Amino acid sequence: MKLKFNVEGMSCAACSASVERVVRRIEGVGAASVNLLAKLLVVDTDVADGELAEKICTAVAKAGFSATLIENKTKTAEEKPEDDNKSDAATAEMRIRLFVSIGFLAVLMYLTMGHMLGLPTPHLFHKTEGAVVFAFLQFLLTLPIMYLNRKFYINGFKSLFHGAPNMDSLVAVGSSAAVIYGIAAIFIMGYSLGQGDFVTVDYYRENLYFESAAMILTLVTVGKFMEEKSKRKTGAAVERLARLAPDTATVERDGRMVEISTSELVTGDIIVIRPGESLPADGVVTWGTSSVDESALTGESIPVEKSVGDSVMAASINKNGSFKYRAVKVGAETSLAGIIRLVSDAGATKAPISRLADRVSGIFVPVVMGIAVITFAVWMLIGKPFDFALNCAVSVLVISCPCALGLATPVAVTVAIGRMAERGILVKSAEAIEVLHKVKTVALDKTGTVTEGKPSVTDVISKNKDELLSVAATLEAVSEHPLAQAIREYCAENGASPVEYEDFSAVSGRGVYAVIDGEVCFAGNAAYMAEQGVPVLEYTDVLASLAQDGKTPMLFARGGKAIGIIAAADTIKPTSRQAVERLYELNVEAMMLTGDNKITADAIAKQAGIKHITAEVLPADKERVVASLMESGHKVAFVGDGINDSPALIRADVGIAIGTGTDIAIDCADIVLMGSDLNGVPEAIEFSRRTMRNIRQNLFWAFFYNTLGIPIAAGVLSPFGIVLSPMIGAAAMSLSSLFVVTNALRLYKMKD
């Protein structure tokens, strides 16, 4: 089972790596994964021990963070405002902290650097006798900024003392070093003034770093604020899904209509839906007809006609007409709630590519602190001034914060999963996205995947169509033949109704017989007609042609003469050919696996544009074929919808289930297409490729930035007059994180 915890206090990938490390050491924990973006810890365990959660919380606390067990439930309408208010309050608090910090920093920067720009400043601050007053004023202006951003010091030093330094540790140590140096400088200047050593006073007056400390704290907060605003967008898809269900519902109780909160709905309630209203629960229509927009759940824009007996889903929108339906699933049991859980859980998983960043981040901060110490020591040993060595050491600390490294993968994955959910493509794990982008072969089940999954009339051949349909409607009225339903529906659509008949009988595997208006009538295959002495020679070529096209022809006779043919077939879905063409455009090979005979399979494959087929295969054979394809070294995706597809869905590198299929197939799949449109397959592949490209861009930038930034901050270019100040380092670090987040948000531009 899985235990989920909300973890507070994490600020970078080093934090998440530290939490994972301490939790994995606990007995009974099988695996632990932390999503920095969602502040979520997911623990896999086989131990049904109530004390395990407490042990995990204690271990996380000892590591310098706080963990709270999350109940496994889905947001309801009532919880949404509370969640939003909490998030808004945190953002508002950060905004106030940021703006006040900027205010104090602006005054500090004006006093210390205004004269360089020709701005009027008190002359006393730039004379030797006013050095101590000027330095102390800078210290006083820095103190409020330090207090407002004390979170960096609390979390940073706590993590450092627990042996798991993180980004906050780097900021805390760097800014503290600058402030402590400034305080020491104030004492040195005061002593030197008393000794008349004005040279020393002027030296320290010109080399104070209070503004650097204030700038570091403020710029890091600016980066965090912008990062937080951007990260909130990554959860927008889940929030929009949560808002789809209405807050209230109109139900029939005790013979009258009552409006109640959605949370009060119970299974069996009769819900009344008017035009334009959103459905609050899953259920079955009991009265009325209408067209329902299910695009928010399935991604299919065309409204679906609903009548008595049809299933409806929560969050669908009634377009026209009124109807009533019986609630079958309410609250956390609805399809919408399941989708929200699936998207949220998938967003909390990690793609394999993120493990590299995790391994690096786990040792990155301690290494950076070591580099900072070495930088300071080297410059001091070769005779550089103390302030220069300190400047370089502090710059190394603040420019190296691994925020970008920790955000590179989870932000992109969260955006991608949310965006795909909006398109009706549900991804169960981040790993599925990474594997899917490598897929080179897509094996498609035929029935219900490429085709509609039920036969429909394709051809009607007769010299007297009205007579043929009248006889067909009567003979098939009580027939149990698989094609009978398709013929009955076609006859009804064309205005043909059954008439009175006598002596009905059916011959298994052959056809049916009845007397209509005193004439013997037959319906069946050519062999049955031959047995009954009905000549069908004139239809021989037509029968062969229909069979070649994968259609099943049904001959009809009246009074000893053949009166026509009605052919039916499991027709391909309207978008199947387009989907296959898109797969080939993506350089992905499409093939079809089916238990049907080769003639029918060839006909369907030709219509869908599929070049490779394997026909007459049993369910176990599908799994074997998929395994064989995988042995060739190619990544293989299998797309199916039935119980018999489950073995192949599990075997494939990526299993993709059609959402209109069986629950077992959906459970076995890695990705679920909420609708029946096969276009979701190439769309998912295209999106996975775009997501992985985005992740690689983010990781490259994060590694490149630190690889380039640390040596420059350490002062290797100082012989050429290039020295990086701590405030510039802080700005660069913030911009790096912002770049990664905004780059990931570009995934929202995926075409609809």
Image: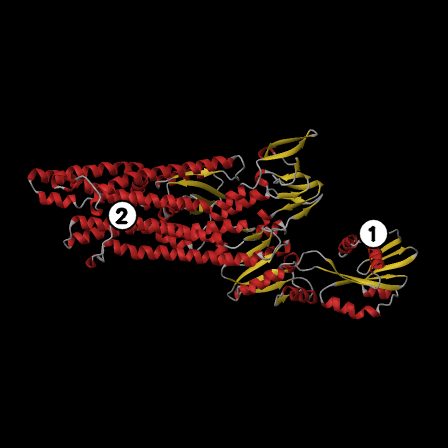
| Mark-to-mark CA distance, 1 and 2 | 85 Å
Amino acid type, residue under disc 2 in the picture:
Met
Query: What residue is rendered at 61% in x and 68% in y?
Result: 611
Left or right of 377? Residue 403 is: right
Q: Which of marks 1 and 2 is nearer the N terminus?
A: 1
Query: What residue is rendered at 36% in x and 37% in y?
Result: 96
- Label 1's element? loop
663 over 681 or under it: above or below:
above
> Residue 129, image x and y in percent?
11, 39
> Crowdedness of circle 1 by 10 Å Cα count: few (<14), some, many (20+)?
some
> Residue 566, image x and y in percent?
79, 61
388 over 144 or under it: above or below:
below
Q: Name the residue under label 1.
A: 497
The image quadrant that residue 202 belongs to is: top left
Q: Which residue lies furthest to the right in this view?
A: 518
Query: What residue is rendered at 58% in x and 64% in y?
Result: 581
- Label 2's element? helix
Q: Name the residue under label 2.
A: 727
> Residue 402, image x and y in percent?
34, 50
Query: What residue is rendered at 47% in x and 37% in y?
Result: 83
> Residue 487, image x and y in percent?
78, 56
Amino acid type, residue under disc 1 in the picture:
Ser
Q: Nearer the viewer, residue 233 or 383?
A: 233
Q: Nearer the viewer, residue 629 or 88?
A: 88
> Is residue 131 something one can see in this rendering?
yes
